Amino acid sequence: MCNHSQSVLVVLTWLTPCLSIAAADDNNADGLAFFEKRIRPVLVSECYSCHSTEQNEIEGGLALDSRAGMRRGGDRGAAVVPGNVRQSLLVQAMRHADDDLQMPPDKKLPAEVIEDFEKWIAMGAPDPRDGAAVVEDAYRVDPEAARNHWAFQLPQQPAVPDVERADWPQSDVDRFVLAALESQTLRPVGDADPRTLLRRLTFDLIGLPPSGEQVEAFAGDRPTETLAEAIDRLLNSPHFGEKWARHWLDVARYAESTGKTVNFYYPQAWRYRDYVIAAFNADKPYDEFIREQLAGDLMHTDDPNLAAERLIATGFLALGPKTLNERSGLKYELDVVDEQIDVTSQAFLGITVACARCHDHKFDPIPQTDYYALAGIFRSTETHYGTVRYINAQRATRLIRLPAEAHLAAGTARLGEREREQIERQIDRVRQSIRAGGDGLQRFFAMGRIALLQARLDAYTDDGEPKRLAMGVTDKPQQAGFGRRFNVRPRRFGDYTFDGMRFIGDSPVFVRGEHDQPSSQLVPRGTLEILTAEPLQISDTSSGRLELANWIASRRNPLTARVMVNRIWLQLFGSGLVRTTDDFGLAGRPPTHPELLDHLALRFMNDGWSIKRLVRYLVTSRTYRLATTSRSDALEADPTNEYLWRMQPRRLDAECLRDAMLAVSATLETTPPVGSAVAGAGEGPVSSFSRRSALRAVNDPQNAHRSIYLPVIRDNLPEALGLFDAADPSLIATSREQTTVPSQGLFLLNNGFVMRAADALANELLAIQPSTDRINAAFVRCYSRPPTSRERSAAEVFLQAYDRQQAAENASAARRQREVWSAFCQALFASADFQYRK
Amino acid sequence: MLTRRSLLQLGGSGFGYLAFAALAHQQAAQARDPKRPLAPQASHFPAKAKRVIFLCMEGGPSHVDTLDYKPALAANDGEPAPGARGFRPARLMGSHFAFERRGASGLWISELFPELARHADKLCLLNGMHTDRPNHAQAYLQMHCGIFQFPRPSLGAWLLYGLGTDNENLPGFITINPPSRNGGAANYAASFLPAVYQGTRIQQRSGSETVSNLTNRRRSRDAQRVQLDFAQELNRASAAALGGSPEIEGLISSYELAFRMQGEMPSLLDLGNETAATRRLYGIEEQERGGNRFSGGFGSSGGTTSFGRQCLLARRLVEAGVRFVEVTSAGWDHHRNLDESLRTSCSAVDRPIAGLLTDLHQRDMLKDTLVLWGGEFGRSPYAQGDGRDHNAKGFSMWMAGGGVKAGVTHGKTDDFGYKAIEGRVHMHDWHATILHLLGLDHEQLTYRYAGREMRLTDVKGNVIKAIIA
């Protein structure tokens, strides 16, 4: 999937400095090295798109992707004559000397490039490309150069720098930040005022605005709450998990349906959502959190509750988008595994390994064998995500049955006796219709109907109790000895993947990633060579997921802690210290504050991988407390605030915005719901009529639960979230875009949910006496501060103008008052100070 | 957003320069006024087409019954299909519809498209189309987004990102009645591109077309203006308090566009503003005579009103400056009862499409409007009962207008219409050509995501120069 021409250029940009260019002599090894470093990349990026045997029609009959093709040449003659630059048409074309032979067309390559080609031809055009075209031939990344990449080194304890303004810092974070600022002769702006700070903290930690009383207690004339107390209160709030789980769910591409082609529900996905919320609330150590999600099923415990929790955690690997109508079972298995490799490498390591499915990674030192070492681990793993065999969805699996002794919420109501009988009767009717005749197609549809109805029954025990099921993974069985292998597993319909690996084992490399092109050699299960001193020790009896999880969740892994620390920094400060939050590899950007990143990574690990402790450490820094005010000199020197001279203002996350409207209008339902509307819909296609209740719940304006509990159906994001840049749950999202588009404005001006919240807030305000306090109360609720005099007078002008407008439209006096205040509240929702976290 | 636009570190010279030149180009391509993400952008090179209407036939229309004349298929009707094996091999099925040469150009078009046939001299038939998979969802996604393996931006989103739009009072990419299956919203997604480039959906409901949150029953326009003035006053105060803020300036202008959209969009959506003659041209039947049953049903229910409304709306939208409009006719998956169901599908779109071409021509808009027609694949030359199965190896699409050669047939399939053998056009090539017709180089139109420069055409695609006028 890589863009080859770009990727080669990118590789070169980092390789160039560390190359010593071979002298142009006849030495074959040096000549070949010159070809690899100087010639091949240009051929790949500039020529192959028209001149390779991979193309449908080779331009001018000239194929440049093999030595033979190049020397034989095309319609005009030999492109390259070794040793003879003048007779080599390739160079003539590159020079654009001839009007009708100019290559590449529309673009002359830089003189240095052409000189390289001349030099290469002069040295005899050494060229290792034998035989047929090898377009996707690996471009070898120099492993030594890559090993020196900053992110592949273990974090080192940095010395805390000295700063000139010794009275400014309040923690080591501040010392690192200030030292960098001073090196650029930048000064930080002043501190945020207490009201702004409390609003910022409250949104950042629990995703909700502070109440008027909380603002008063923290920032009033006689404060009763200190900063440390406020931080502890927020960290201990059950809403902390609801806010921070959402960030993880973006990364984990959490959703309650398969998405892609036929989009089927995952009715048990919500258990994973609740697991993540609980993990953040309990401050589960991050290393434990990693192990549970990758290998919770393999972590032994006698506690059934803990066992259930860990099984649910492995839902992480099962939640991905799936193409249920893929025809080839092997291709399907490889696609599921690819998605698991992708999410594992991106979520925990901040690098993209999935590129290496088809070829060695173009930017990073990840050979294809690394990919298939990981693929062996996941191919030895059974993925359980449920769904039924249906008309165009043949890839059903069984869900995991959770331990009966565990205390687990049901998620749906019991199945009543009458309802069961009704479903059974329906099944009978369809069966009879099949027996009565009908052609193949009718039978086919009838079978699908039965499968859906049966799935509904299967979700309950015989006495109508919802089964406690979860998505997740387990190890495939171990290959039994000869003679027993045939009765190990019957290939049952609707169970397991068909043509993939059935036992624990290693995977071959698949040439060009094509499922019908396995190479003969198996790659031992393992992980990324560049990051390991010794190969993982994986026994024949396990997939290797636990070993992989331990390797990731380790102090010895240079990426894991840094990547997570960077994400937490991103949420609190608006950009990561590594701005390419999704790429810690060679094509990513280096950290703006490398020592600070290492300082935090080490502190995080030393603090028992505690996220809450890290958050507390960061929000108590003075850097976090900076105001958002701009200063022209700093803005000019550092427009993107890389040096953290101020707090970056930004719009509230989609979830915070929606939740804030509910909160300030006192309509927020703070008790979490049990389960999800999708759980109620049960297994089957999103598009089916009988399951429409879940789809309708997506945009139900009366749903007053926090946004994290809204159903997440792929390709059907709630409008209130989707319009405001919530992550597409089909993508692994480590950061969100921030757009400002008119459809957001239309939503805030016209949507029923927004107007309901405005009505509710208006009712709250109208209950306030004396009425002159109402404007003040509205601003305190929405902005966590009283209005400025400019805002107060604008409000007064508006209230009168709107009332006049209403009167002109002949509204009754009683109705007018409510409409005026509702319109007022809605305008506040639409205003920047409500939507922005400053 | 900034993270994805980041410049890579550059090192050394020589190839460093090459890399720099390429990256600097992308930087230029991605650098745009954040307050006006829809503002018109310069194309990479001059081009005739300024806008696109894509008439999308969801389900896979049969090419061998409509646009790809196969006398040898008829002559071998009932014979085992080449390569078919086993006890009951698939059997070839000749078309039951008569083909004729049409117009001065003599393009072969069957009796199923009598109205379209009158416009033969405007069409560029692509009879050598092929795509990767004979599965609806994959092929449908590939047609829209280039690849189906991962979520990717749609063609319309890429065009909007590349060119901006001529009417910033309207979204630049609009899709009318997109199907919820076969990838659903993924087919008009912005994916990793900024959300502003996402397709805005207009859904036909009970016979008319709507945009979400476009109207407010509670507040008059004047009342809302008073309300918005207040909100904007607060916004200006916020920006001032920060010492200036591009973000809040952007917010202020987006509200004004939203407000203006409320003004412009409903009247655009109101087809009553068109003359009766125009409405007839598109096959829109005068409704509400004796009740409104079926007046706005789906295409498959027969009648030209539904698709006619969509085509007319598409013309109104591009005329108003929208860059890319997609119109969907669903239900071309004719596995069974081909003779009747294909006839129904064709007749539902034939007059509306002919009306659209006539209308665009009369308004002198066809010269710079690129009209695209086609589905995700074609259908098999062999029978599947009384229908045809999917066929991805060879099928037909057409283009008209905006810089495309008129009255020509490009490419051909084998004698039976199974496989494209000449003038082959893969979906990647189709995309590359469409971008080219609008003045964009598909290799230069990139966006940085997940550490890579992404393209609509992935690593493939060749511009079909032979069809460019």
Image (tube, grey):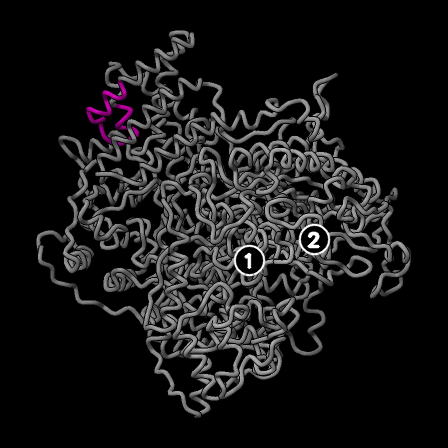
- Residue type marked 1: Thr
**Which residue carries the number 2 mark?**
B126
Q: Which x, y percent locates residue B296? A: 68, 28
- Residue A577 image-quadrant placement: bottom left
Q: Answer with left or right where residue A146 lies relative to residue B107.
A: left
- The question of residue B112 being in magenta is answered with no
- Residue B232 image-quadrant placement: top left
Q: Nearer the viewer, residue A58 or A462?
A: A58
- Residue type marked 2: Leu
Q: Nearer the viewer, residue A280 or B285?
A: B285
**Label 2, residues with CA under 10 Å away: few <14, some 14-19, many ≥20:** many
Q: Answer with left or right where residue A794 lies relative to residue A90.
A: left
Q: Is residue B432 above or below residue A446?
A: below
Q: Label 2 is found on which chain of the structure?
A: B
Q: For residue A526, say whether it is visible.
A: no
- Residue A23 image-quadrant placement: bottom left
**Which residue carries the number 1 mark?**
B457
Give the magenta part as a residue range: A777-796
Q: Is residue A587 above or below residue A112?
A: above
Q: Which x, y percent locates residue B423? A: 69, 60
Q: Label 1 is found on which chain of the structure?
A: B
Q: Nearer the viewer, mark 2 or mark 1?
A: 2
Residue ID at (28%, 28%): B234
